[in-house]
Amino acid sequence: MGTILQFSFAETDLDRIAEATGRVAITVDAAGRMNPAARRVNRLTKGALKRMVESKAWSKVKPGQLCSLAYPAGLAAEAVDVVKLDRTAPVIEARKAGAALAKALGKAELLLMLGNLVRGHEVAAGLALRAYGFETHKTAEAEATGAVQVMSAKPDEMKAACAAPLAVAEGVHFTRDLTNEPANHLTTTSFAERLVEMQKLGLKVEVLDEDELQKLGMASLLSVGHGSDSPSKVVVMQWLGGKKGDAPLALIGKGVVFDTGGISLKPAAGMEDMTMDMGGAGVVAGVMKTLALRGSKANVVGLVGLVENMPSARATRPGDVVASMKGDTIEVINTDAEGRLVLCDVMWYAQERFQPVGMVDLATLTGAIIIGLGHENAGVFSNDDAFCKDFLKAAEAEGEGAWRMPLGQAYDDMLKSRIADMKNVGGRPAGSVTAAQFLKRFVKDETPWVHLDIAGVASVKAETTYAPKGATGWGVMALNRMVADHYES
């Protein structure tokens, strides 16, 4: 499992600064003005802090960044981290400050002096999000994770303000853990078991096995797993925190625990990255955990289709025709375009069973979206402008890159098949758009829908503001914000 920092909260005690071990963090505003904690550090270090904030080096530090005094005289701490942050700093700056502290922290303990910062809880949020490492499969004994003591003028209020952001961080970490796991450790069965464990948080969790999926008519989803010994599953998670009887928001996740491409085999180079092809299901799981941890006053259902795409004598072949739960037939042109075959059945099932007020699906669906948007933005497709705007606004507020892409009849026409109702691919042009058009065929007219192609943002090769390289947990914060802003009673 990834790192989970332990937070405690106390009233500001300036005398603790001298005796604290590990690291001490204080803030100084852009004008160099010192709060009481900073003035105490300056006195203990015989003016070293004042010399720092008057230096050219400090003038080059941007808001939300820090400089460190290593092994300062007069303190027991190994370092004092001095963050440039105004008392009324905006959310993103405050979170970046927390993330900078987390990078400097390592495994040490931290005394975090927040004083009367207006958004001190956002500093804690950034710290919790960035303090992550996935070391589950390393044989060296892991060092104990340091604890964080947060000192502020009103600790009870600070603790209450931090509760929801820390729940979000825990959900993000859960998504990262799932996405980082190797496929031999995160099988369809073990993935489902991890989701069932969330029943202890108050979620209602059901696992539909292959026999049940066959009875439901999910032949499209089942066709993807034909070549694997791992059984295909659909896991349904319900959080019923809103008004009884109110229709839920539905979140749908692609959960391909490993994608070889099937008979349409991928090139060997880079195939090891396909352990992250369950990233959409990982985000749904992380959101559901977040909602439960913070006691959301909303009704939300999360559904994930768990399969493994492998080549074998039983595997689906290019040219095969499969039937969807909706009843439409699909000519499988490319078995590496398997995610949409999973999602279409789960999306239809969600609408048939729950009649949701809206539906969001997430999938590491196409390499084409990476060509179009790189690793900065997820692709956003929608049939409803207002619903889409709600998501985009939430993503922007949380600093998670998202960009709306087009849909249209011309793209849909590219899916016409000679022998079935549709093909599963439309060719190389506009690959991410035709994938979205395929999914749109399984969205009922009355259902507001957003499709998120997260292939470029679910797992990355370089660190981001809030995550080390690897799984990012992108989407958990935005979807949690969307729920909080629009679906809580």
Image (cartoon, helix red, strand yellow):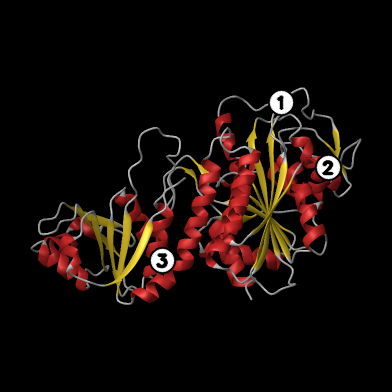
The residue labelled by disc 2 is: 214
Q: SS at mark 1? A: loop
Q: Is residue 264 left or right of residue 485?
A: right
CA–CA distance in space, label 3 to label 1: 47 Å
Residue at image x 73%, y 35%?
Answer: 225
Pointer 3 residue: 122
Marker disc for residue 311: 1
Sequence-earlier tag: 1 or 2: 2
Secondary-structure class at tag 3? helix
Q: Position of residue 151 (x, y in %)?
A: 29, 69
Left/right of residue 282 with respect to residue 98 in the rendered view = right
Give the CA distance from mark 2 to mark 3.
Answer: 47 Å
Instruction: Judge by depth and name the residue closer to the eye, 292 or 463.
Output: 292
- In this rendering, the label closer to the viewer, 2 or 3: 2
Q: In the figure, is residue 176 to the left or right of 244?
A: left
Is residue 48 visible in the rendered image? The answer is: yes
**Residue drawn at the location 49% of the way across and 67% of the way down:** 164
Residue farthest along the top direction in this orientation = 313
The amino acid marked with disc number 1 is Pro
Q: Earlier in the sequence, mark 2 or mark 3?
A: 3
For badge 3, the amino acid type reads Glu
Q: Say which of marks 1 and 2 sits in front.
A: 2
In the rendered image, the vertical position of residue 106 relative to residue 486, given as above or below = above
